Amino acid sequence: MGSYVPSTRSQQEEMLREAGFSSMEDLYRDIPDELKLKAPLNLPDGKSELETDRILKALAKENKEYLSIFRGAGAYRHYIPAIVQSVVNKEEFVTAYTPYQAEISQGVLQSIFEYQTMICELTGMDVANASVYDGAVAAAEAASMCRTPKKKKVYISAGVHPDTLQVVKTYCWAAQDEVVVLPLKDGKTDFSSVEAEGASCLILQQPNYLGIIEDARAAGECAHANGMTFVLSMDPFAMCLLPSPAEYGADIAIGEGQPLGMPLSYGGPYLGFMAATSKMMRKLPGRIVGETTDAEGNKAYVLTLQAREQHIRREKASSNICSNEALCAMTASVYLAAMGPDGMQEAARQCYSKSHYLAQQFERIGLKRMYEADFFQEFVTVCDNPQELLKKLDAKGILGGMPVEGGILWCVTEANTKEEIDALVKEVSA
């Protein structure tokens, strides 16, 4: 808001006169007197810029900055090229408002179009949207897409992120849909209990919350054999190394876009992404930008296929998405453009190889993996007292893995160096 200039007192008085009021108090004359504030708010006096700066710096010193991070569990530390924040921090982009007026919003609309295009390239799907709040919401919205009057049962893997499972359950509770959680067997989803009757979709996460690479192709075949839509949630970097959602046979591809240029930042803001086959295109919620030509034949971008009004119809709404997520979408598209296909693949290879190196080093010192299945960038080790080990690492400036039932979920990305990994192993073995 660097260019924002508040109205002056004389301008305020002019506006009051034009509206037919004699004073600011007159403007609120219809408000009952007992509801009006009679005394100043009980707030401390304002601070000068220098005083505020000192207070904030003192507060910042209370934060703990870890020398190395080995925790993922849905929020990942990746290298972010400097150009990403340089571009998206420009004040003309900092808005959550929907670009309804295409004639004055071509830049924002084009950025969304480019984001959609890149998501389609990553997922292999035909069409993508924007404005999805996070990966958990994307899963819940995907379940809503698949609902029909006769199909109100959602199958979801126990291997999805716990937050995703809770959000899907909440959405389905409101819609009176049944949620069936498929259990894990040796770390992978067991599809043996799937039945066709009343089932709308099957939701799987690849890799799953425990980091294990699922048999997503078999999941897709199971879903389609039982007349269900196959919804695959997938890590953006995993798509650069493993088959794409389209190659796995997914009808809807979803996921958490935080790894695409969004820093950890105390948990937000994050970005959900959604893409689908052309068959599911008209059920996609959120904003969809299309490319066309104007009256003079010039390239132009417009919101297409649907109107936002379909999402603001209370109990008749087809989606809960309303506010625009264009800034996060732009962040992802700038990040993807800066990294390029080669950069994304190299980062994915490093996530895979470095995490496997850590697993091998843990094995060498007697810290065993809980599951033998292959993994991408996260894995679980057996640990009787996770908190004790994590507290020990914390004292050394190392953020260890996420405590899970029976062990610790460790994560390694391209941002971790070999020296950091070796230092972690040394501390664990001490």
Image: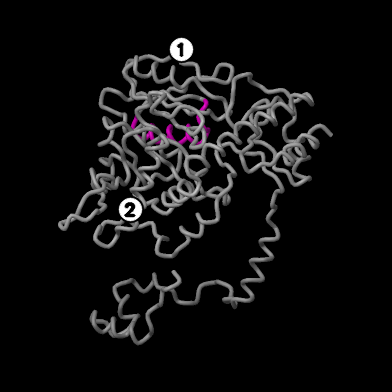
Residue 285 point in image, percent of width and height: 31, 41
Residue at left offset 56%, top offset 41%: 75
Dividing the picture into quadrants, the one containing residue 390 is: top right
Single out the mark in the foreground, 2 or 1.
2
For label 1, count other residues whose C-alpha is less than 10 Å away and answer few (under 14), some (14-19) or many (20+).
few
- Quadrant in which residue 200 is drawn: top left
Placement of the N terminus among the 4 image quadrants: bottom left
Please check the rendered image and state whether residue 168 is part of the magenta-colored stretch, yes or no: yes
Q: Nearer the viewer, residue 81 or 251?
A: 81
Q: Is residue 95 above or below residue 51?
A: above
Look at mark 1 in the image and give the residue it sits on.
192
Please report the bounds of the magenta region as a residue range.
159-176
Q: Secondary structure at mark 1?
A: loop
Q: Are marks 2 and 1 in contact (CB under 8 Å)?
A: no
The residue to which callout 2 is attached is 110
Q: Residue furthest left?
A: 295
Q: Residues within 10 Å of mark 2 (few under 14, many from 20)?
A: some
